[in-house]
Amino acid sequence: MGDQPIEQAMFLMEVTWWAHRAFWQLVFSGVLERHPNLQFVFTEQGTAWIPETLGTLDFIFDRMGTAIGSQEYEWGQPVVEKLSLRPSEYWARQCHVGSSFMRPAEAVLRHAVGVDKIMWGSDYPHKESSFPYSREALRLSFAGVDPVEVQQMVGGNAARLYQFDFDALAPVAARVGPTHAEIATPLPIAEIPPDAIRCPAFVGLGR
């Protein structure tokens, strides 16, 4: 892509597809099959794409293996016969998502994605980051969500995956927060700062 407005617009339209594409390449090329201990993180991608993508890939996978006489079977059967799991099962075993500025609607999908797979992010220092309104973004998406699940998504999953020292981090977390009570407090629409609209987490909700 170049630096002309139309090229930049096309980049915005297509960048997420290119980022998601890595998942089915890893699955169908057999990388996740050959390296079952590999843990792969898709970051800066949100979570809304995952349930539908997994459903689509499982459907294609099944067609490749069973739809005798179809083009899917002819091209795909030699590929899927080497795989022991469906795409959604590889996701569950080996994949995680760095979920920048989660929207409230995405929080609803957390179980379809896997609560243990989601690592919330502010997308700082990008222009569309939730900073300096990250606490408001957390309240918007996670008020009413089980605090154990919130703790997983906001920090616990990342700390576990990257093998951070929980004991060393605990004093820092206690000092900088946010607290369970703070995140559990619903965010009234009137409290969303007008300039927060640059962050997708607040789309359609600002004044």
Image (cartoon, rainbow, N blue to C red):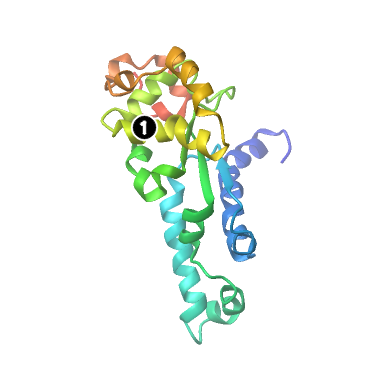
Q: Between residues 8 and 102, which one lies in front from this camera angle?
A: 102
Secondary structure beneath dot 1 equals: helix
- Residue 88 can be seen, yes or no: yes
**Which residue is situated farthest in the front direction here?**
167
Horizontal placement of 55 versus 13: left or right? left
The 10 Å Cα crowd at callout 1, few under 14, some 14 to 19, many 20 or more, is many
| Quadrant occupied by the C terminus | top left
Residue drawn where x is 45% and y is 58% of the image: 54
Give the quarter of the image for residue 78: bottom right
Residue drawn where x is 60% and y is 59% of the image: 32
Q: Is residue 137 above or below residue 163?
A: above
Residue drawn where x is 50% and y is 78% of the image: 65
**Which residue is situated farthest in the bottom direction here?**
69
Q: Please state which amino acid type lies under the numbered disc 1.
A: Val
Q: Between residues 38 and 5, which one lies in front from this camera angle?
A: 38
Give the quarter of the image for residue 133: top left
Q: Label 1 belongs to which residue?
A: 150
**Residue 171 x, y percent position in the rendering:** 47, 16
**Residue 141 x, y percent position in the rendering:** 35, 30
Q: Is residue 12 above or below residue 166?
A: below
Q: Is residue 4 above or below residue 13?
A: above
Q: Is residue 84 above or below residue 103?
A: below
- Residue 102 can be seen, yes or no: no
**Residue 198 x, y percent position in the rendering:** 48, 23
